[in-house]
Image: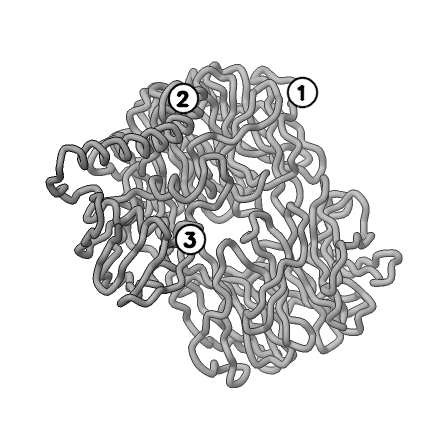
């Protein structure tokens, strides 16, 4: 039997694809998807159906990225375009449909094609063969579904909540479980930003707010209103708005809690009795983020936790019975979190996880107050996990794929909602005609199957080092300066980043968090395990870079719970030397005898200090600048701001004239530039695809 469409023929038994009779090379996963589509011509084949066909139920894989790659390769083989498709039509966020006419040559028919008449004996043989195949397929299906039924009591169903917005996030269920409030925030402002509420199964979401800075919705226990946080310079304010829309009313205001870490959202939780908000507020006199109860009657505050120095408590979540608050305790610039619980009446917090991994909120309790659902990349790519509120081993949430964040559980109705993120960041190169002019448009040099970032050139300009999650964990990779021959350098299965080449090109220094604190490591590119570089014990030591003579490694450290300062340590080993006293992050030695650095990781100032310390001098100040958005050259600084509707614009700051010259506006969001040693090219990372879709899991338990 053979499928025919256009000039192509597919043999299901041998998985052979031919064009005009000539056999074509095709990967196995691509032919599996093609056969699945050909079995249902003209019909929608969902992404979940394709996942089941490609990967067993217990396979841990980045499904979204993997399927997109398979479809892309299949289109390339068929010479099919996404713009004017002849064969495969994309149904956004749902799946795919084979749209070309399909002929079937053989003794069976695919679904959707009327069967030809045959003799009774032939029909019986077909029935027997089909029954055997169906029995085998049913056995596999029953096995997979039974695994879910044993856990959930029934088969889970995963569907998009609305399918209307490009960027959806932060779902929150109403007390009756029939409505979900969420945030819409497109990467390019189009007027749809703000908070929305939708009935599950409803047709059109109701818009509650229109401010792009609104986030983190939470329903009031009486279902009459929705609270949310709105960021502003210096802090955030929590407002409440009627559930059917209206004028927001201020509930509570807090100064900036996470100045260094903008990814730590001002998450809060409403107590089940409606009397309190649990927030992360600055304690006195330590000024550390602390889980605090705020009375909605008289605005009084009651701190519940007291984090150790260098730690921040955030992301509180009341249990449904009101007896316990779950929260995250974060340490260091790597935003490494662990899960804790504390009684609402006060007491010693109990630690539930010891992963020292990035997690992120919000947290979700099961309705019986026995388990907590959280998002973590504790076993590679981020997914949802569940753990007993009394402790134990976390388990993955069945039926939820990777890149899942922001879980929410309905108080009634056995429903889970979460954000499914599709983020594709690629490496691009821009050639420079001179310091103030580009030699042409940027060129894609390294497409990525996951997140990549923070590149650096080798001293000869022939190689790049960068961090990437495409193997499942944040690891250090190298590649040619044209993106060729990418090679994974570390296999630490942790959080490794900010790689910098040694002057001789033999080693790469990077930071890595083996336990409670980030440390500096170096690895030889020729092979071998990473080696620990002793710096400052008991502190977070991050973002290394080498001196030009190769004798020193610069780094940032928060020794003694101080603000980050710039230090250097001999490459051969020895006592660290402090260079700055007024704050410093991301140091880089210039060609003029100074070390350049950001004032802090989230600060719009660049400073410089002599190589051996001394007077600290402000170099430039640009709104929207941070420690990852600039690259140092011999005659100036290239930097990227979020101008141009958030996409970014490349500028050059000239040391001689102290003038800022615009070079190029970008078409998409661009971050983290790196300059080649000869100053003739820049590489940067471009967010070529970023979608967030809220998924609804029905029959969740």
For the residues marked 2 and 3, what is the alpha-carbon distance in whole angstroms? 31 Å
Mark 2 and mark 3 lie on one chain; the one further toward the N terminus is 3
Q: Which residue lies under the disc numbered 1?
A: 348
Q: Which residue lies under the disc numbered 2?
A: 149
Q: Is residue 540 above or below residue 329?
A: below
- Secondary structure of the residue carrying numbered label 3: helix
Assess disc 2: are there few (<14), some (14-19) or many (≥20) residues with their C-alpha within 10 Å of its C-alpha.
some
Mark 1 and mark 2 lie on one chain; the one further toward the N terminus is 2
In terms of depth relative to the viewer, which is nearer, 578 or 123?
123
For the residues marked 1 and 2, what is the alpha-carbon distance in whole angstroms? 38 Å
Q: Quadrant of residue 587?
A: bottom right
Assess disc 3: are there few (<14), some (14-19) or many (≥20) residues with their C-alpha within 10 Å of its C-alpha.
few
Q: Which residue lies under the disc numbered 3?
A: 28
Mark 3 and mark 1 lie on one chain; the one further toward the N terminus is 3
Can residue 168 be seen here? Answer: yes
Percent position of residue 540, x then y: 72, 47
């Amino acid at each position: 039997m053979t499928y025919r469409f256009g000039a192509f023929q597919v043999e299901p038994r041998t998985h052979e694809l031919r064009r005009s009779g000539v056999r074509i090379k095709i990967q196995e996963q691509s032919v599996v998807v093609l056969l699945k589509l050909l079995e249902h011509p003209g019909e929608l084949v969902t992404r979940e159906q394709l996942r089941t066909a490609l990967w067993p139920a217990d396979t841990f894989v980045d499904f979204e990225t993997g399927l997109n790659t398979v479809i892309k390769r299949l289109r390339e083989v068929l010479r099919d375009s996404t713009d004017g498709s002849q064969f495969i039509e994309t149904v956004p966020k749902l799946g795919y449909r084979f749209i070309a006419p399909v002929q079937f040559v053989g003794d069976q028919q695919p679904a959707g094609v009327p069967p030809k008449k045959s003799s009774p004996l032939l029909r019986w043989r077909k029935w027997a063969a089909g029954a055997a195949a169906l029995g085998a397929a049913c056995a596999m299906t029953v096995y997979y579904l039974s695994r879910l039924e044993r856990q959930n009591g029934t088969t889970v169903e995963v569907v998009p909540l609305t399918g209307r917005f490009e960027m959806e996030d932060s779902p929150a269920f109403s007390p009756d479980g029939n409505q979900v409030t969420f945030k819409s925030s497109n990467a390019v402002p189009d007027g749809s930003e703000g908070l929305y509420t939708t009935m599950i199964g409803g047709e059109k979401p109701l818009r509650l707010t229109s401010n792009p800075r609104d986030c983190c919705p939470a329903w009031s226990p009486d279902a009459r209103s929705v609270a949310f946080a709105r960021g502003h310079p210096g802090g955030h304010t929590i407002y409440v708005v009627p559930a059917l829309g209206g004028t927001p009313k201020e509930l509570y205001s807090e100064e900036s809690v996470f100045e260094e870490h903008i990814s730590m959202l001002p998450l809060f939780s409403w107590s089940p009795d409606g009397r309190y908000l649990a927030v992360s507020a600055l304690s006195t006199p330590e000024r550390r983020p602390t889980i605090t109860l705020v009375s909605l009657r008289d605005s009084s505050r009651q701190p519940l936790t007291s984090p150790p120095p260098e730690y921040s408590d955030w992301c509180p979540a009341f249990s449904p019975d009101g007896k316990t608050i779950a929260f995250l305790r974060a340490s260091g610039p790597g935003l490494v979190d662990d899960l804790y619980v504390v009684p609402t009446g006060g007491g010693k917090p109990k630690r539930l996880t010891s992963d020292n991994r990035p997690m992120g909120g919000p947290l979700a309790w099961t309705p019986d107050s026995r388990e907590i659902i959280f998002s973590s990349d504790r076993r590679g790519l981020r997914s949802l996990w569940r753990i007993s509120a009394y402790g134990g081993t976390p388990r993955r949430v069945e039926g939820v794929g990777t890149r899942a964040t922001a879980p929410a559980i309905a108080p009634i109705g056995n429903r889970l909602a979460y954000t499914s993120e599709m983020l594709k960041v690629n490496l691009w190169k821009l050639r420079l005609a001179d310091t103030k002019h580009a030699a042409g448009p940027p060129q894609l040099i390294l497409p990525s199957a996951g997140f990549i970032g923070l590149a650096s050139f080798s001293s000869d300009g022939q190689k790049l080092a960068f961090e990437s999650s495409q193997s499942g964990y944040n690891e250090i990779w190298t590649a040619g300066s044209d993106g060729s021959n990418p090679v994974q350098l570390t296999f630490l299965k942790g959080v490794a980043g900010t790689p910098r080449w040694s002057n001789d090109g033999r080693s790469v220094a990077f930071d890595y968090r083996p336990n409670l604190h980030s440390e500096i490591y170096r690895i030889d590119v020729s092979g071998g395990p990473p080696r620990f570089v002793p710096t400052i014990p008991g502190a977070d030591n991050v973002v290394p870079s080498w001196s030009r003579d190769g004798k020193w490694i610069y780094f940032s450290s928060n020794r003694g719970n101080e603000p980050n300062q710039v230090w250097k340590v001999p490459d051969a080993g020895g006592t660290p030397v402090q260079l700055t006293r007024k704050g410093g992050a991301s140091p880089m030695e210039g060609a003029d005898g100074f070390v350049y650095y950001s004032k802090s990781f989230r600060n719009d100032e660049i400073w410089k200090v002599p190589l051996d310390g001394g007077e600290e001098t402000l170099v430039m100040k640009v709104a929207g600048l941070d420690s990852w958005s600039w690259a140092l050259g011999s005659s100036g600084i290239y930097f990227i701001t979020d101008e141009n509707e958030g996409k970014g614009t490349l500028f050059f700051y000239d040391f001689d004239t102290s003038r800022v010259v615009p070079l190029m506006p970008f078409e998409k969001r661009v971050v983290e530039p790196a300059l080649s040693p000869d100053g003739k090219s820049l590489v940067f990372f471009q967010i070529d695809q970023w979608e967030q879709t809220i998924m609804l899991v029905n029959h969740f338990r």
